[in-house]
Image (cartoon, rainbow, N blue to C red):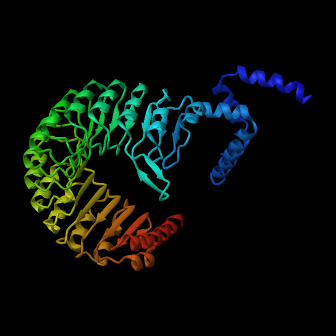
Amino acid sequence: MVKEVTPHFRKILRDVPDDVLNRIFTLLFSSEATRSEGNASILPAARSRRNALSRTCRLVCSQWQIVHDRLVKHLTLRSFPITTPRKLSRKFPYLQSLDVTRCQLCNTRLITISTLTSLQTLEVGRAASEDASFGTTQYISLSPDAIKSLASLTKLTKLDISGCSRVTDGSLASLARLSNLTELNLVRCGLITGVGLRALGELGNLRRLNLAFCSQLCDEYLEVLLVHTNLVSLNLSACLPITNEGVRTLSRLTNLTELNLDRCELVGDAGVSALTSLTALVSLKLGDCYRVTDASLLALSKTPLDSLTHLRIDSCERITDQGLASLCSLSSLKMLGFIGCEEVSDEGIRALTALTSLISLSFGSSEVTDLCLRHVASLRSLNELVLEDCYEITDSGIHELAVLPHLISLDVRASSVDVLEDVQSSVDVWRYVCSIAFGVNSADSADTSATIVAATSQARDE
């Protein structure tokens, strides 16, 4: 009887659309989860059993396996050895998102991946290859021709080719055919110049562009970015040739909400002052910009940057208490970081108490003492606090933070604080903190952090 019914059933399966068939198969295993909905404690276990059963049945029922694979749209294969990329295109013909970051991927394999014409997101950053002679994995540079092959993926909206150091202006120009592209990551593509950026001018939908560590980019090349009027996020960190003049050019990109100028060492007060015209700016990063002084912060405070919520000025060594005090007018700030600003003292921290919306604060200076933590304790919205190289802060000062009702992460590494005994003996005080890290080196802090997390998690459960 089974032999007579099976061919007819198979014919029916072939006529049913893939999405409908997959839904039917999936519903066969939903009853257990449905019965468990009233009991939250067994729901995850029920789902796990259902998923395991589903995987098993896909191995038994070839039709379901085929249907399931056809409907897969998102696939992540990070650090995975891709030896037969042609199978990807056959097995997952409707794939929309593929992440092969750090995968063992040669030029031929990348060209084969370019046949997945339904892809909308592709991440091939830091591709790797296996060195058979040493049994090690080494990062390789995909060839310009391999990069050019990606131009056939005309549905792409996001492309990450970071770390592909052989990307040239010519191969970049071929990507100009990707008219739907909204996000492009070119980190460490060090051969790119203004010629390649000019070719990208045809990408009218581009909204996010990452050019970090593109060492040949200089002020004159930034002019070509002005055609990207829809650009909202731009990362130029460690583009060392960029100066104040280049930043003045960027100030004409009035839709920018995120700008990263970390490690742009030639950028100073004049450049930062020019950025005050970017009234939509939400996030500004100026870490390791050694020429930035209090004058930059004063300029930011005198303009209507009501949307600015994230500001990072780590290692801007010329920032003082006076500069921090000027930030008090930026009432929308939620994240502020100034680790390595050695001129900042308790008085500067006291001035920050006016920033009542802060949820993340990180700083480090040998000039601050326990007194500053009394001021920090008044920032009741804080949920994350990082204190780095604050050698004058003691356990007594740390205890002041116990009044912060929303604090869930405390990092006092590279300081003289030793709070483990205090936390374990007074768990009730720290019951809402999920993570505490301290110590001088990462190994010590990892061990002690794990101990404290366990203690505080137990307190929350109780």
- Left or right: where does residue 352 sit relative to residue 438? left
Q: Residue furthest top?
A: 15
Give x and y (percent) for residue 251.
15, 36
Residue 3 visible (yes or no): yes
Q: Residue furthest right?
A: 1
Q: Residue at x 49, y 71 (%)?
A: 455
Q: Residue furthest front?
A: 133
| Quadrant in which the N terminus is drawn | top right
Give x and y (percent) for residue 53.
72, 45
Give x and y (percent) for residue 374.
24, 69
The one nearer the camera, 280 or 199, is: 199
Residue 433 visible (yes or no): no
Q: Quadrant of residue 167?
A: top left
Give x and y (percent) for residue 447.
45, 72
Q: Residue at x 54, y 43 (%)?
A: 83
Q: Is residue 402 above or below residue 246?
A: below
The one nearer the camera, 330 or 93, is: 93
| Quadrant in which the C terminus is drawn | bottom right
The one nearer the camera, 75 or 433, is: 75
- Left or right: where does residue 44 sit relative to residue 111? right
